[in-house]
Amino acid sequence: METELSEFEQQMRREINSFMDNEEETRRKAASSTTPPEWPGEAGDQAKPREQRSKPGGAPKTGHLVKLAVRTKQLEMDSVFEHVSSSISKIEAQLEAEKAAREAGFPIIGYVIETQRL
């Protein structure tokens, strides 16, 4: 049992030492290299494919999703109108949504159902 343990310790020391030696060599090579670092946006960056975004390319990155209860006639059931605003202000987003609803042909705007941050 003791011989197995000592053999294991020796093997681990050898592996650690070889790893440390390799690491020192790579550091020396990196320090002695005279090539300047590559900055983002240089020619080499164009060859790499872009990463997938969580949102589509045309979607705003910030803003609000505003849901309004709207009607076209006075005695009609409310329907939901959704508007995506790029404004970071809730009130501005609500005003934009109301204006968009009127432009879409809903003259009567009842109330705000929900406002979500994007």
Image (spheres, rainbow, N blue to C red):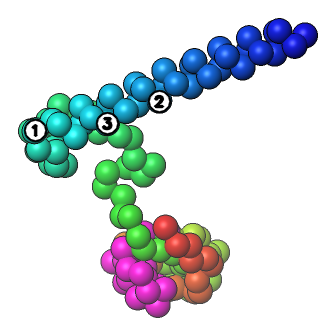
**Predominant SS along the magenta part:** helix
Left or right relative to 81: residue 55: left
Distance from Cα at disc 2 to Cα at disc 1:
25 Å
Give the mark nearer the N terminus: 2 vs 1.
Answer: 2
Magenta range = 82-103
- The image shows residue 3 at horizontal and vertical percentages of 83, 9
Q: Residue at x 32, y 30 (%)?
A: 26
Quarter of the N terminus within the rendering = top right
- Which three-letter amino acid code belongs to the residue tagged 3? Arg
Left or right relative to 48: residue 12: right
Q: Which of the labelled discs sits on residue 35, or is there none?
A: 1
Distance from Cα at disc 1 to Cα at disc 3:
15 Å
Q: Which of the labelled discs sits on residue 27, or is there none?
A: 3
Query: Is 51 rendered above or below residue 103?
Result: above
Q: Quadrant of residue 98?
A: bottom left
- Which three-letter amino acid code belongs to the residue tagged 1? Thr
Q: Residue at x 45, y 49 (%)?
A: 54
| Disc 1 secondary structure class | loop
